[in-house]
Image (tube, grey):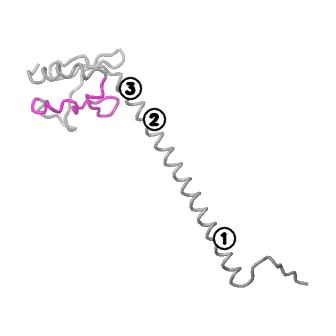
């Protein structure tokens, strides 16, 4: 004996209801997939920002001591080192580009770093400019 439900829709109404439920299920699955992808992307971004901030803190501790014979004297930790200055990833005539002194670069910790990110750049900027222009 077949039991016929009185509340369940019949015929085309049933197929419309079934299609509506299926479309809702697909939309929910797509939203879940999108949210999971956004969480993954955000986690990667947080990790990249954390690594970059750690590097910037490390660079911020490097102190400029002066400029001598075409080399920049810097203190990295307890060690005083000489580093060559670059402008635009190549050595150029630094005298011609003194207006861009903040963008001069030196190699620190395996990467090229602009002078403006070093510890006491603001105080030493004029001294370095003068030394470069005079050829000291």
Dot 1 crowding, Cα within 10 Å, few <14, some 14–19, many 20+: few
Query: Spatial distance from mark 3 to mark 1, Cα to Cα?
Result: 56 Å
Q: Quadrant of residue 33?
A: bottom right
For the C terminus, give its image quadrant. Answer: top left
Residue 27 drawn at (x, y percent): 58, 65
Q: Is 93 covered by the magenta stretch?
A: no
Query: Residue at the spot x=13%, y=30% of the render?
Result: 98
Task: Report the mark closest to the observer, 3 or 1.
Answer: 1
Asked whether disc 2 touches disc 3, contact meaning CB atoms under 8 Å apart, the reply is no
Dot 3 crowding, Cα within 10 Å, few <14, some 14–19, many 20+: some
Residue 48 drawn at (x, y percent): 44, 40
Q: Which mark is residue 21?
A: 1
- Say if 86 sits above or below 128 in the image: below
Q: Is 117 covered by the magenta stretch?
A: yes
The magenta region covers: 95-118
Left or right, residue 40 beside residue 87: right
Residue beneath label 3, please?
Answer: 58
Q: Which mark is residue 87?
A: none
Left or right, residue 32 beside residue 76: right
Residue beneath label 2, please?
Answer: 50
Query: Residue at the spot x=39%, y=27% of the render?
Result: 57
Element at badge 2?
helix
Query: Spatial distance from mark 2 to mark 3, Cα to Cα?
Result: 12 Å
Q: Earlier in the sequence, mark 1 or mark 2?
A: 1
Q: Quadrant of residue 10?
A: bottom right
Task: Report the mark closest to the observer, 1 or 2.
Answer: 1
Q: Quadrant of residue 49?
A: top left
Element at badge 1?
helix
């Amino acid at each position: 004996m077949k039991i016929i439900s009185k509340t369940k829709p019949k015929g085309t109404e049933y197929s419309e209801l079934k299609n509506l439920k299926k479309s809702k299920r697909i939309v929910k699955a797509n939203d879940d997939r999108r949210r999971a992808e956004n969480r993954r992307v955000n986690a990667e971004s947080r990790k990249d920002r954390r690594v970059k901030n750690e590097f910037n803190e490390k660079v911020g501790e490097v102190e400029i001591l002066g400029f001598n014979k075409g080399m920049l004297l810097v203190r990295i930790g307890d060690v005083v080192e000489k580093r060559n200055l670059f402008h635009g990833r190549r050595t150029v005539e630094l005298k011609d580009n003194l207006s861009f002194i903040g963008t001069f670069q030196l190699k620190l910790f395996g990467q090229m770093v602009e002078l403006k990110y070093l510890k006491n750049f603001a105080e030493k900027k004029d001294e370095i400019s003068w030394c470069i222009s005079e050829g000291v």
